Image (cartoon, rainbow, N blue to C red):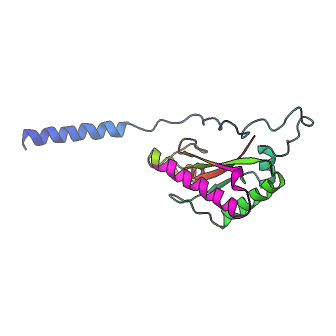
């Protein structure tokens, strides 16, 4: 072997060792909820009714009416299509929105950690728009719905496995004050 070949092999070996030693940083806490939403806030307004009662039209009322996970629809890898199960969830959301015509929502699009930041932001946007378009197609006024993509920046589940990824490929509906 020539000196050049030996140097290349050594460089390749060192590079491989460095890359292999670089692992992903474990995320300990999730980022905060978006501003202007009441997602994750206290479920009561002490001035509205008695303490402990859920305020009508709030995110907690929304979750109570549409079900524990009725605020989100899940997607397959690299997909943004609305399947029959998603349609049923979005129909329940539309029924709730019909009860509160003054309430506006934001549909957040999310992706799992795989892929580039730009790709996941675009995929999250397509997911949020798919949910919005379906809601509009069944009668929700488009002016009441905003969309935002967080890509992979706001995971719902921490971890680097299929179970966590499946929970993070989603569109979440959040009420806006």
Q: Residue at x 88, y 40 (%)?
A: 53
- The answer to which image quadrant residue 159 occupies is top right
Q: Residue at x 46, y 44 (%)?
A: 117
Vertical arrangement, residue 11 with respect to residue 91, above or below: above
In magenta stretch: residue 138? yes
Q: Residue at x 66, y 36 (%)?
A: 35
Vertical arrangement, residue 25 with respect to residue 163, above or below: above
Q: Which residues are magenta?
A: 119-146
Q: Could you say where residue 105 lies in the image, as x and y percent from the top left?
A: 71, 48
- The answer to which image quadrant residue 56 occupies is top right
Answer left or right for 94 relative to 20: right
Which residue appears farthest toward the left when viewing the image? 2
Work out which quarter of the rendered image holds the C terminus and state it. top right
Q: Could you say where residue 140 lies in the image, as x and y percent from the top left?
A: 73, 58
Which residue appears farthest toward the front when viewing the image? 143
Q: Residue at x 50, y 51 (%)?
A: 122
Which residue appears farthest toward the top when viewing the image? 47
In magenta stretch: residue 20? no
Work out which quarter of the rendered image holds the N terminus and state it. top left
Answer left or right for 33 relative to 10: right
Q: Could you say where residue 7 lies in the image, as x and y percent from the top left?
A: 14, 38
Answer left or right for 21 relative to 134: left
> 14 or 69, which is in the foreground?
69
Prevailing secondary structure of the magenta residues? helix
């Amino acid at each position: 072997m020539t000196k050049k070949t030996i140097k290349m092999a050594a460089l390749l070996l060192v590079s491989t060792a460095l890359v292999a030693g670089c692992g992903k940083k474990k995320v300990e806490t999730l980022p905060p909820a978006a501003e202007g939403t009441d997602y994750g806030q206290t479920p009561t307004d002490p001035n509205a009714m008695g303490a402990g009662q859920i305020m009508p039209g709030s995110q907690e009322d929304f979750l109570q009416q549409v079900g524990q996970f009725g605020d989100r629809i899940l997607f397959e890898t690299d997909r943004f299509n609305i399947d029959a199960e998603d349609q049923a969830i979005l129909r329940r959301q539309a029924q709730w929105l019909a009860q509160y015509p003054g309430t506006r929502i934001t549909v957040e699009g999310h992706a799992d950690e795989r892929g580039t930041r730009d790709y996941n932001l675009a995929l999250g946007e397509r997911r949020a728009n798919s949910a919005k378009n379906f809601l509009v197609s069944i009668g929700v006024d488009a002016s009441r719905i905003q969309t935002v993509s967080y890509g992979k920046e706001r995971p719902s589940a921490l971890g680097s496995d299929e179970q966590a990824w499946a929970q993070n490929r989603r569109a979440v509906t959040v009420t806006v004050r």
